[in-house]
Image (cartoon, helix red, strand yellow):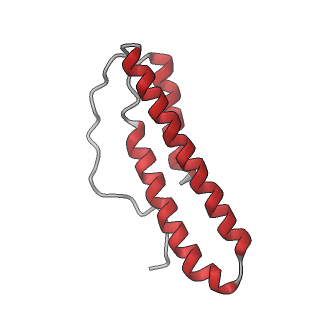
Amino acid sequence: MISESNKALNVISSSIKTMTHPSAAKSHIENAKTAVEELKFVFETVFLEAGLLPIIRVASILEKITKLVEKIYESVSELSYLAYFKSVAEPNVSLVKPNLLHRGI
């Protein structure tokens, strides 16, 4: 999830430099959000029973980071609209979601 947030921030940064819409960052943000939900599920089911609250706190912090990256994306998207940034053709994105969290299956 951190790598997806990093990719999203890189796309957003690049879009500001090139004055283009940051639409490519949306898929990275969605992947990060999916990974956060999977991680929270694993932590709540496995680690809560074992009494490992610090690990659950880490997941909570990662969730907050992902939400902040999404807010940055929304702000830059609004900026790109108001400043008439150039549109970029959407790349062909695979509909298959990558396995972001290995569950040992």
Residue 68 picture location, percent across and down: 57, 43
28 and 81: which is toward the camera: 81
Q: In percent of the image, x 26 and y 53: which residue is there?
A: 95
Q: Quadrant of residue 23?
A: top left
Please indicate whether residue 51 sits to the left or right of residue 73 in the image: right
Farthest residue toward the top?
83
In percent of the image, x 41 and y 50: which residue is there? Answer: 30
**Residue 30 shown left or right of residue 6 in the figure:** left
Query: Is 88 drawn above or below residue 25 in the view shown?
Result: above
Q: Position of residue 47 (x, y in %)?
A: 64, 79
Residue 6 visible? The answer is: no
Residue at the far bottom in the pictured view: 49
Image: 39 above or below 21: below
Residue 28, percent across and down?
43, 45
Residue 44 x/y as whole percent: 57, 76
Question: In this rendering, is residue 69 above or below 59?
Answer: above
Q: Which quadrant holds the C terminus?
A: bottom left
Label count reads 0
Task: Note whether residue 91 is visible.
Answer: yes
- Identify the residue at horizontal 29%, vertical 57% (top origin): 96
